[in-house]
Amino acid sequence: MSPTLALQTGEGAAQRVKHAEPDAGGIVPLWREVPSQPRPAQDYYRLALLKEPVWIWSVPAYFYVGGVAGGGAVLAAALHGKTRLRRLAAWCRLLAFLGTTVGPALLTYDLGKMSRFLNMLRVLRPSSPMSLGSWSLAGTGMLATLSLLQGDRSGAVTRYGTALGGLMVAGYTGVLLGNTANPLWRERRLLLPLLFTSSAAASTAGVLQLMPLDKREEKVVQRFGMVGKAGEAACMVAMQRSEGTVPEVAAAARGGKGGVLWTAAKAALVTGILVELLPVRSPVKRKVSGALTTIGANCLRFALLESGKSAAREPQATFNLQRTRMKG
Amino acid sequence: MTTPATGFFTDTSVCIGCKACEVACKQWNQLPADGDFFSGRSYDNTIHLEATTWRHVAFIERQARLSGQATSRPFSWLLMSDVCKHCERAGCLEACPTGAIVRTEFDTVYVQPDVCNGCGYCVVCCPFGVINRREDDGRAWKCTLCYDRQKAGMEPACAKACPTDSITFGKLDDLKEMARARLQELHRRGVTEAWLYGMSERDQPGTEGLHAFFLLLDRPEAYNLPPDPSVPTKGVGGSWGVMALAAAGMAAAAVVAAHSRGGERK
């Protein structure tokens, strides 16, 4: 409407007219049969019940970067005061700093209104994992910057504060995904925090393995990483098992882009563990293992987002999950 | 606040599918068009509630008779005007990190457009798939239960436009009484499949009751409504507990790794 003809003051007046053609991939899923033909009224023309997550690539990328930062912050605190591991501690502090500064930038990039990114700290809403996460990310970012500047001389408050914040940043994303209406994520609400935390440890070690390390440093990184990778593998196995209850949820998890990414994540993780277990010691082996871990951790996070989108598109996943819960 | 809670009671048994509510909503709120296309799904070309579609009329063609209906072949129409449910415990509100989504003095759920930064968390947290983020605008939008009209003492545009009073607006307590009376009347007439969806906490413990509830004539799945929706943040404590355990494990792993041979103290 032209502003010369009428004054627009309504709630939605600032919005523009959408593209006239429907988005074939998003709004109207393709149907395999004529909808008006007789069929049991199990659903509403197979149309999606839930809305797909609107998040773009930068959100799973943040999940990874935040994980690396969290693991780095924790390891930096544990390494404090060990003279021979000073260089490694410095690397860790740098990772914590980079992750907590690049991370918010990635999150801001996904916002619909980037200029309003500070609104994230407008209120503290304890019921919202995203609110708690935003506050801890902001706090950890400040403390990590302080730790980086102070280096070895950082005080106990900064050190342990960064570590605590790092633990929160590494794990809250799992709580955030698990407590949504999405049937796939919701089913895994108790596994996702475990997965994200253990994968964060593995990711941090993966990045550190790509850097020049001496023998002692390598050992520390390897141990930290192996615990993380073992936890990650265990969580992934448990997730695949838990999908069995509702076939539509399992189909959403295994099919499409998400399924391919999930398989890639599994393959990279398993190969990474196998390479790590080889009885040789060389920088090449370490770097290959680190690269595999990094690839796997990224695939895993993109897989979770993509399969979440598939699950939201399938109304039967939600229906059957809720019907099963009602019976049980 | 002493303002009584208001809401919608949508009686689908008298809906004629005229879509006057959709049009009235678009006009009052000055929402843009969704584009012209033929969906092939009965007369429903709106498909679903969207950021720019705050009322949506569902058309269900069933190969089954309604009780007391006489047709040569088993067939019946089910029509329903869907809307944001303004849940007693709203998933979007509890998830919103900016405080953009608030509960108004009328106990409705309202997104403040001047605060919302489009993080998209409410989109995945609505168990009914109502709220969505506009790609061009970048903010999340949904039915406001005509907050502006209510403030001026008027009823929402959709209820005002509804020619059959399928959409009734009023005080929540009055609506519940009216719904119970209507249900009894329908049951008395032999339409035994009629039931109330989400009227009270007992009907729908997951959301503790809806402020926009429905009289339905089939299973909720037929209308694309979830049979047992639940506020996602209700079970958040368990997840935080698991995260605390995982965090303890990660801290322990770091300490053990740092103390491995070669890392002796100064």
Image (spheres, coloured by chain):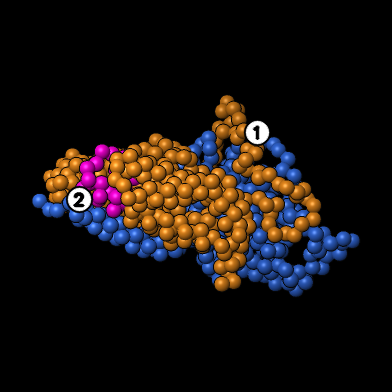
Chain colours: A orange, B blue
Residue B139 position in % (x across, y down): 49, 41
Disc 1 crowd rating (10 Å Cα; few below 14, some 14-19, many 20+) is few
Q: Is residue B11 magenta?
A: no
Q: Is residue A282 above or below residue A241?
A: above
Q: Residue at x 57, y 26 (%)?
A: A4
Image point 74% across, 71% down: which residue? B192
Going by the image, does A92 lie left or right of A246?
A: left
The label on residue A129 is none
Task: Give the residue type at disc 2.
Answer: Leu
Res. A93 visible in picture? no
Which residues are the magenta region?
Answer: A204-225
Percent position of residue B142, x then y: 55, 47
In depth, the one of A90 and A127 nearer the eye is A90
Q: Is residue A218 magenta?
A: yes
From mark 2 to mark 1, how far is it between C-alphas? Answer: 59 Å
Q: Is residue A18 visible?
A: yes
What residue is pinned by disc 2?
A79
Tell me the residue that label 1 is attached to: A20
Are discs 2 and 1 located on one and the same chain?
yes
Single out the mark in the foreground, 2 or 1: 2
Toward which corner of the image does residue B78 lie, by quadrant? bottom right
Q: Amino acid at mark 1?
A: Ala
Residue A320 in the image: state x and y as whole percent.
Answer: 61, 62
| Subunit that carries the residue with mark 1 | A
